[in-house]
Image (cartoon, coloured by chain):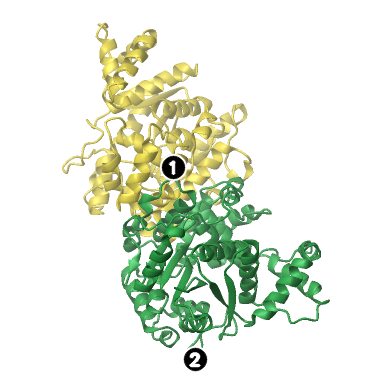
Chain colours: A green, B yellow
Amino acid sequence: MKATGVVVEYNPFHNGHLHHLKQSRLKTNSDVIIAVMSGNFLQRGEPALVDKWTRAKMALSAGVDLVIELPYVFATAQASDFAKGAIFLLEALKCESFCFGSEEGSMEAFRHTYQLLSTKKTEYNTAISNFMKQGISYPKALNEAYRFISESSSLPLVDLSKPNNILGYHYIEAAFQLNASIKPETIHRIVANYHDEAKPNETIASATGIRKVLFDEMDFTAIEHFLPSTSLNELQLWKSNFQIFGSWERFWPILRFVILRHTKEQLANYAEVTEGMENAIWNAAMRNETFLLFMQQIKSKRFTWTRIQRMLTHIYTEFTWEQLKNMDLPTYIRPLAMNKNGQAYLQSIKKNLQIPLVSRVAACKDNNMLELDLRATNLYYLGLQTDYGQKMIGSDYKITPIIR
Amino acid sequence: MKATGVVVEYNPFHNGHLHHLKQSRLKTNSDVIIAVMSGNFLQRGEPALVDKWTRAKMALSAGVDLVIELPYVFATAQASDFAKGAIFLLEALKCESFCFGSEEGSMEAFRHTYQLLSTKKTEYNTAISNFMKQGISYPKALNEAYRFISESSSLPLVDLSKPNNILGYHYIEAAFQLNASIKPETIHRIVANYHDEAKPNETIASATGIRKVLFDEMDFTAIEHFLPSTSLNELQLWKSNFQIFGSWERFWPILRFVILRHTKEQLANYAEVTEGMENAIWNAAMRNETFLLFMQQIKSKRFTWTRIQRMLTHIYTEFTWEQLKNMDLPTYIRPLAMNKNGQAYLQSIKKNLQIPLVSRVAACKDNNMLELDLRATNLYYLGLQTDYGQKMIGSDYKITPIIR
């Protein structure tokens, strides 16, 4: 059986994702699609709209054969580590290829870009740190450095100011660095911009746009033409159980509690908290009663919103620099959901896996990386602050992979 | 001006406390009554029903002239440290005497008891640890050891199985150990038992009984004959602002969050968490959706309910063994409220104080003990989980002592 991999968050699963899945199957002619999916906290450093089980079910309904959880350490990391964790897992799962969506849409440009940046690595890094010294954010410095380096090249290159192109670049870089045999493929994204708002009369909107409608209007009819009906059903089921959707705004009373429970010095121990941000975070938590006001007070040119949110995620889940340093690659494969096809595939590769397959977490002792996933799951449910959330504590121990 | 001191929690202030204040003034013929009062967390290891400002106002209305905050470190400590912190502050405040309520009611018996136990210290301690080895709680072992030691004495002794007698004993012990010049006095308590339920047709009930009625029935008419009307008014005002009263049951979602945010090993770093209780606490937090169920699962012969609650308080406020070890005596005097009389007294002793008087906390930098008080205050308000609680964050910086 031939498998291709996708790296996803599905927050929530929408028609754009469906398009990507269909194209991935066509392009690679695969029998199996494996999705490596973030758990309850995401790469943008925020809690997911709905939990990982709900999102895994959306994925199954839409044609994914096997959903694997990307451990917290990688799911909430900066792009290069996020990519490394995900590609490592897809390689470990014996995928022949992986397909990522990009604004670019052509592998040729990605290959040229990777070659350019790896041959000019020193110049590139020097340029990045020079731009950083001007007090701009890391992504902006990357962009400026890239523009500077690419001036000398006449080959077609990727526009690295586009978010999905950046992520794609990191996937390719990860595959090279891991010396992986997995083959990268890219599919042209049909939503122009990641942050676009959902527009009526269209069938594709970004997840960000869809979430915005859900938070602002709590209205399913306004988003129903952007999602498969199976996704919509899952969202409705979630809503009827949990009452609300996951967001930092909702989690704010508890996040605020956690911040103020620490001294500023202690906050600096948490992963990604750096350059005095512990002071800004603590002071702003003292003063602000909403997450939005809090963020408006601490945002700066130096750090992106996303980067700051990742600091907060790590404070919330008690994930330290020390732990970050000690975790390099995924140490287990944890399936969340599969159909018969995915199950058969997993059966076929089971004996040749390099890292353990963890179907029942209770059977896997003393794995720090896995414990972090379990903790993050519990803290997500507690953050919802609803009775149903309280009931979900420890659910990782009770729910075995969903099989359909 | 002649001052006498009382050590109080006023959770809430009731007619029994009023009786004690009147008797204290009579017995010592003092011009000024100074109350050293716990902040938002109490010696039984639980959040106060209403905050310290509200309780300080109740005290002022009932005749206390000056209310001083007992720092968190002492307010939430075992009886001997609680007593040491409180008596040290009253001595620092130049009180000629202090008056404690006891079931015993006579100083003679307390003096005999203190003499007996200090002359037979080694035997007493050996007996305590022998009884402890049988797996009973510390207070029970204390009791048994005391019974064993006192068999040889023919003098009138205090019954140390009664909670207020125990506390009184520790006050006297503290005064001796601090080599204090303050003179102990005791007043007979007119409520028989600490844990008695509030009974109609009487005017005095224990604070525990009153709280029970408030939690069970949320009904002010059922308690109005047990409290001065000024206390009742404060409770009603609190209720209309905050909606609910402070309790672990109310705080449970956040306490549960804090517990599950840690590994079991980390929990063992918090003050008073010992002998594997970190495992019991973590496991029970995973399983239980209410505080009561949680406590029922972890209670044991080995530890009293109160002792376990103190562990939880320290986990909640991030107070470690390390910090506990490094804090010996109060390092500041923090007035919460005073009347003109109390203000004049404070003015008269101001120049001769051995530790700083802190009226504005913002002016007092780098005091770890005070920072703990401020943190505990904030975390109390966040634990209430109401909008008004959120608004009170940082109030310690805004509210200067209440002067009436």
Q: Is mark 2 on a helix, strand or loop?
A: loop
The residue lying toward the viewer, choosing from B315 and A339, is A339
Residue B330 percent coordinates (x, y) = 53, 30
Where's the C terminus of chain A, which quadrant?
bottom left
The residue furthest left is: B201
* Vertical relation: B153 (above or below) A1: above
Mark 2, other Cα within 10 Å: few <14 / some 14–19 / many ≥20: few
Which residue is under mark 1?
B315
Q: Residue at x 65, y 65 (%)?
A: A176
Determine the image quadrant of residue B63: top left
Numbered mark located on residue A161 in the image: none
Q: Can residue B302 be seen in this view?
A: yes
Q: In this view, does A394 lie above or below B280?
A: below
Q: What residue type is labelled 2?
A: Glu
Which mark, by number, is residue A202?
Answer: 2
Q: Which residue is drawn at 45% across and 75% down?
A: A215
The chain containing the residue under callout 2 comes to: A
In the image: residue A234, left or right of residue A282: left
Name the residue nearer the viewer: A105 or B89: A105
Query: Does the rendering let one see residue B36?
Result: no
Where is residue B381 drawn, in percent x and y? 44, 52
Viewer-side residue, B154 vs A105: A105
- Residue lying farthest right? A152
Residue positioned 44% across, 21% down in the render: B174
Q: Which residue is drawn at 56% across and 85% down?
A: A191
Question: Which percent across, then down, holds residue A338?
Answer: 37, 69
Tag 1: residue type? Ile
